[in-house]
């Protein structure tokens, strides 16, 4: 039985539907009344030109609707449905129609989240346990994330335990199913995730992690162990930013490594960063992969490197970001090369402008231009969206 189905039964039992005493029934009703609705709607236009015979375009509306209960004996529960629909017949994209470039926002209706959560006990202060279908994001989502950019986000079925004491935070999760950004990425798994961080490290935080992944159907495994440091140092008018990360990965076909180094500065509201990310290769036979990551946020928004090429990837990039008159502005330039050999994959420019309107609305424009050399084809992508969040 899926964890989400079990969670629903636990929720009903925990919140007092087992028909015990009137007091419990009253407490259950109070928990419902103290709850809050969950609503998120995003209307988005996406256009893709990859030098093929046809361009793709999609206009889709994603709606998430759910309810979060109030607390009862330290428990609360969340149920949330998600629906993505094509709007106005703008559906010239694969997989919706063959012969067009891919836009990974198919029409789908599903249970996005359904979990029961426990926290608030004096005897177990600092402990949170979440059981069922849930959103999980670790650190910057480079290894485990919800792929929030796509209309159908990625969630997980399983049990997650979080414990916080003083400046230390520990998290462990046992996952049995990945609910991907399209139905073809749904998978039964046996995944064990571990993440521990020290929030009082000099200048920032230090995190150690281990993500042990196994696909039930194929038996393929992917075990990743790493260490990440993220810090900021105030120096009068300048804030220096530093991130360092390294990881090793073991798969059936070989062992690979991951490195990330980023140096930045924040001056008068402008943030400039220079970085390099390396997803290594084992003699061109196998490359470092991040199957549970929010991949769109990394290695260029044109999504040319969602699967790391066998020769690995070196992504050297510079980014500039600021806020002006309420608008968020960002620009990123990437230079992509192979880790194994001397191939120059290509370059990419990313541009973003977004603006919140009040507390609940966001509008934005986003553009990606990938110029291919030794990998892929020239690709341009454009997005325009409006979002409501409650």
Image (cartoon, grey):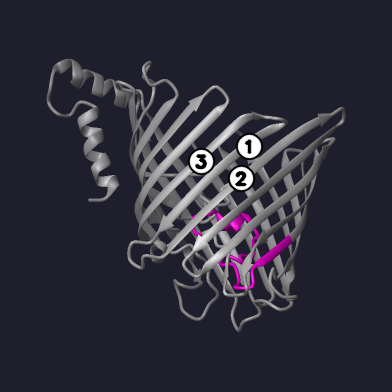
Rendering coords of residue 389 (x, y %): 51, 40
Residue 227 — which label? 2
- Mark 3 or mark 2: which comes first in sequence? 3
Nearer to the camera, 319 or 357: 319
Q: Is residue 324 among what the camera can see?
A: no
Give the residues drawn in magenta, as a range.
291-315
Which residue is painted at 42% across and 37% down in the image?
38
Q: Are marks 3 and 2 in contact (CB under 8 Å)?
A: no
Determine the main secondary structure of the stretch shown in magenta.
loop
Element type at mark 1 = strand
Element type at mark 3 = strand
Nearer to the camera, 304 or 385: 304
Q: Are marks 2 and 1 in contact (CB under 8 Å)?
A: yes
Check if residue 306 falls in the magenta segment.
yes
Element type at mark 2 = strand
Circle 1 Cα neighbour tier, 10 Å, few/some/many (<14 / 14–19 / ≥20): many
- Mark 2 or mark 1: which comes first in sequence? 1
Residue 206 — which label? 1
């Amino acid at each position: 039985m899926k964890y989400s189905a079990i969670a629903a039964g636990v929720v009903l039992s925990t919140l007092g539907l087992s028909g015990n005493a009137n007091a419990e029934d009253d407490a259950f009703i109070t928990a419902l009344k103290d709850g809050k609705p969950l609503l998120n709607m995003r209307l988005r236009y996406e256009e893709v030109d990859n030098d093929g015979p046809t361009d793709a375009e999609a206009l889709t509306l994603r709606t998430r609707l759910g309810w979060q209960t109030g607390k009862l004996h330290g428990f609360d529960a969340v149920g949330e449905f998600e629906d993505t629909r094509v709007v106005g017949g703008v559906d010239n994209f694969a997989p919706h129609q063959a012969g067009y470039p891919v836009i990974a926002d198919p029409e789908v209706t599903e249970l996005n989240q359904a979990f029961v959560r426990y926290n608030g006990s004096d005897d177990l202060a600092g402990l949170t346990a979440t059981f069922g279908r849930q959103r999980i994001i670790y650190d910057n989502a480079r290894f485990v994330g919800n792929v929030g950019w796509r209309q159908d986000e990625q969630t997980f079925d399983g049990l997650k335990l979080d414990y916080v004491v003083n400046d230390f935070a520990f998290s462990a999760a046992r996952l049995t199913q990945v609910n991907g950004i399209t139905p073809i990425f749904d998978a039964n798994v046996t995944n064990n995730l571990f993440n521990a961080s020290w929030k009082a490290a000099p200048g920032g935080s230090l995190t150690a992690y281990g993500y042990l992944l196994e696909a039930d159907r194929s038996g393929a495994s992917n075990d990743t162990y790493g260490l990440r440091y993220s810090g900021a140092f105030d120096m009068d008018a300048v804030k220096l930013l530093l991130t360092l990360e390294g990881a090793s990965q073991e798969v059936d076909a070989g062992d690979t490594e991951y490195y990330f180094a980023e140096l930045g500065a924040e001056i008068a509201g402008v943030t400039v960063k220079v970085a390099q990310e390396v997803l290594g290769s084992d003699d061109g036979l196998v490359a470092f992969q991040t199957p549970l990551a929010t991949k769109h946020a990394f290695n260029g928004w044109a999504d040319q490197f969602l699967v790391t090429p066998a020769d690995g990837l070196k992504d050297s990039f510079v980014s500039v970001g600021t806020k002006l008159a309420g608008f968020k502005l960002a620009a990123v330039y990437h230079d992509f090369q192979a880790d194994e050999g001397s191939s120059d994959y290509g370059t990419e420019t990313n541009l973003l402008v977004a603006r919140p309107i009040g507390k609940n609305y966001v509008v934005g424009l986003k553009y990606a231009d990938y110029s291919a050399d030794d990998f892929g084809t020239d690709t341009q992508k454009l997005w325009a969206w409006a979002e409501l969040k409650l």
